[in-house]
Image (cartoon, rainbow, N blue to C red):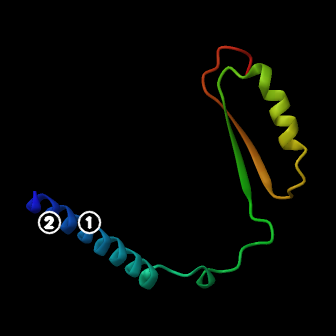
Amino acid sequence: MDLILHNHYLGVIGFLIAANLITLLNALLLRRLDRYGKLEATPRVEVLIPARNEESNLEACLRSLIAQDYPNYVIRVLDDHSTDRT
């Protein structure tokens, strides 16, 4: 029983050491957000609508997206082999 507990403790300690090491490496090696360039005031956004047999829902969805006041976006509707008039 003592051997099982000993191995369990070693596993937990090993996991905690590995998790802390990964955290430390990420903190040292990953780029900080302030190192990236400035974003445009309104970056381009693309809205993708997968539409398969959505004839009854698609118009209301598109009307609500078109009514958005965001200035820089594109709406793309992807017709996935619909059997209705989508």
At which x and y percent is residue 51? 67, 29
Give 61 or 73, whichever is nearer the viewer.
Answer: 61
At which x and y percent is residue 39? 72, 74
How many residues crowd around disc 1 within 10 Å: few (fewer than 14), some, or many (20 or more)?
A: few
- C-alpha gap between disc 2 and disc 1: 10 Å
Question: Decide: marks 2, 1 in contact (CB < 8 A)?
Answer: no
| Residue at left offset 61%, top offset 27% | 80
Q: Amino acid at mark 2?
A: His
Task: Give the vertical position of 59 relative to 30 (above or below).
Answer: above
Which quarter of the picture shows residue 33? bottom right
Which quarter of the picture shows residue 22? bottom left
Q: Amino acid at mark 1?
A: Val
Task: Give the vertical position of 13 relative to 27 (above or below).
Answer: above
At which x and y percent is residue 36? 61, 80
Quadrant of the image containing the N terminus:
bottom left
Give the mark, 2 or 1, whose residue is nearer the N terminus.
Answer: 2
| Residue at left offset 39%, top offset 81% | 24
Label 2 vs label 1, nearer the camera: 2
Task: Give the vertical position of 60 relative to 53 (above or below).
Answer: below
Give 75 or 28, whichever is nearer the viewer.
Answer: 28
Q: Could you tell me which secondary element the residue under label 1 belongs to?
A: helix
Residue position for label 1: 12
At which x and y percent is residue 8? 19, 61
Give 56 or 21, whichever is nearer the viewer.
Answer: 21
Residue position for label 2: 6
| Residue at left offset 25%, top offset 71% | 13
Answer left or right for 60 relative to 7: right
Task: Give the vertical position of 37 relative to 57 (above or below).
Answer: below
